[in-house]
Image: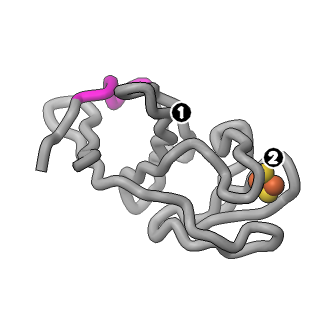
Amino acid sequence: MTWIPIGKETEVPLAEMKRFTVEDTDIAVYHLNKGWYASIDLCTHQDCSLVEGEIENEEIVCPCHGGAFNIVTGKATRMPCVAPVETFPIRVVNGLIEVDFT
Ligand code: FES
């Protein structure tokens, strides 16, 4: 595993999300009650930015056509989304958010 620091824990308050660009890839970081999660910031339906959408419980609802994904697993949960969104391991160490792309 190669953990890459992408930002500070304080940049993403609880129940919110934020986009970070790492190595030319847009990553959506989600801060839920149950922990930290990361996915590619690209809906698998028509490439909309997921961080422009809304968090509903453990789902991210895409702003473009109302499709959704489970934030924890990346699995598509609402049409028109069918393909899962890619997720990444994430952790917070000493106040820094780190993701693993490998
Ligand atoms: S682009 Fe996300 S639901 Fe269509």
Label 1: how many residues lie within 10 Å, few (<14), some (14-19) or many (20+)? some
* Placement of 83 over or under 56, stated as above or below: below
Q: How is the image coloured?
A: one colour
Which sits earlier in the primary sequence, circle 1 or circle 2?
1
- The residue nearer to you, when weighing 85 against 53, is 85
* Placement of 35 over or under 81, stated as above or below: above
Q: Label 1, secondary structure: give it.
A: strand
Instruction: Kindly give the residue lying farthest to the right in the view shown.
Output: 65
Residue named by callout 2: 63
Which residues fall within the magenta stretch?
A: 5-11
Residue drawn 29% across the image and 54% down it: 89
* Placement of 82 over or under 34, stated as above or below: below
Residue named by callout 1: 18
Image x and y of residue 20, in percent:
46, 28
On whether residue 84 falls in the magenta region, the answer is no
**Quick check: is the Cβ at mark 1 less than 8 Å away from ligand 1?**
no
Residue drawn 77% across the image and 51% down it: 46
**Quick check: is the Cβ at mark 2 less than 8 Å away from ligand 1?**
yes
| Horizontal relation, residue 7 to residue 85: left or right | left
Q: CA distance from mark 1 to mark 2?
A: 15 Å
- The residue nearer to you, when weighing 90 against 8, is 90
Q: Quadrant of residue 82?
A: bottom right
Q: Can residue 57 be seen in the rendering of this structure? A: no
Q: Label 2, secondary structure: give it.
A: loop
Q: Quadrant of residue 9?
A: top left
- The residue type indicated by label 1 comes to Lys
Q: Can residue 6 be seen in the rendering of this structure? A: yes
Residue drawn 62% across the image and 45% down it: 42
